[in-house]
Image: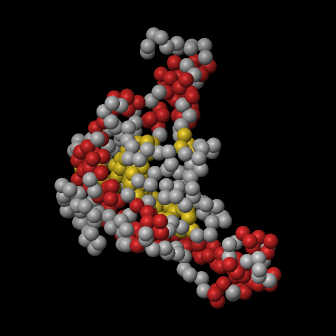
Amino acid sequence: MDHAVSLQSDSPLFNRIPPEVRNEIFKLALTGYEDPKGRKYRVSAYYCRPGFTRAYKIDTGLLLTCRRVYWETCMLPASINEHTSWYWREPPGIKKNHLPIDNRRSSIIRRRGLRTIHVFAQQIWLEGDSFAGFTRLWQYVCPTTLIITLRHSDWWWWESEEPLTFDPKQEGKASIGKHSRPSDPFPPGSWGNQFRKIKGLRKLQLELETVDKKKPELDAIVDRAGGWEFTLGDERVLRLNKSKTRRTGWIGPWQAPHDRGGPEYEPEETISSEESHSPDNRETVDTTSVTETLNPDCSQDATVREMEAACESESARLRLRRTKLREAVGKLQAAGVAFDSMEPLGGPGAEKTSIYYVVHLTWET
């Protein structure tokens, strides 16, 4: 230990609490979290999702208390927290395509022990040249865990609801209907072959997300994933650990691609007028809030009776939508999909919602 660092032998923190217990306390203090005072993300944004609803924060004030504490904790912020990188559609204030792997800082990152990198990327990033460039820079960081997340809006042509395609043994964009076999090699230009440039990786996690109606397409991809074994630059091999495969779901806002020129579509079935006026779907509505519904039938010039009828129909439509949503979630739960919350990410008042289905795959050496 540096002679300038006081051992503080009179402090109960150091003379009574065992080092292993003290280290756990320090880890809790330095673990990142969603800052409740930070900027709240727009719920309908592509980057807003469970675990990423606000700006992320790591409190490092602990490192400033004394030299002894700094000496024991300076590596923890980097080693126990994920370093998250966004390749397109990043939260506000986040630098796009950023990784702490430039040569000027590589020695610092190595010394402080960065362990986990989490990448949010579009499929084109993985299948194009970007992932190849990413792997070439790996030597400057050498983390042990890589997490890659493809969101519903990251798949090729998700706007027009093209079939999901995903194959690390194909060069460029994976072809529809063409699937590799376990015995097939990785072509030089395939993204699966890029792992040969990586050394030191011990765990790869893929999080693949889509909407619930595309669950069969994603499940078909997952079934083929058992035949993907990635050879690393140090000759270790990443193999799928099927016991760690998880299936989760969450309810979030309907993501319309209209701002990118694609067609708008409804995630739920269209509700007919007969269903809307069904006696079973009627419920009492406070007519004092009709001006907040933005429904033309509830204009101020309408009669009270017309207003009540129009709002009753609107309320019945929303009630039926909620019923269908619950039924869809129930089917997924019966299939082994875990939901942490039954409420939409935007709150119970969110009208247009979608159910997102996520499969978590883990490869280990």
Q: Is residue 77 left or right of residue 352?
A: left
Which residue, as the protein is rendered here, is positioned at the far bottom?
Answer: 274
Image position of 21 with respect to 333: above or below: above
Q: Is residue 217 left or right of residue 189?
A: right
Task: Tell me residue 346's x, y (percent).
Answer: 61, 60
Image position of 268 with respect to 55: above or below: below
Which residue, as the protein is rendered here, is positioned at the far top?
Answer: 3
The colour scheme of the drawn protein is secondary structure
Residue 359 in sight in this render: no
Task: Tell me residue 205's x, y (percent).
Answer: 38, 52
At a point 73% along the width and 78% down the height, the residue shown is 298
At a point 52% along the width and 75% down the height, the residue shown is 266
Image position of 254 with respect to 196: above or below: below
Task: Tell me residue 178's x, y (percent).
Answer: 25, 71
At a point 72% along the width and 87% down the height, the residue shown is 279
The N terminus lies in quadrant: top left
At a point 37% along the width and 72% down the height, the residue shown is 162
Along the line of sight, which residue is nearer the eye, 90 or 143?
90
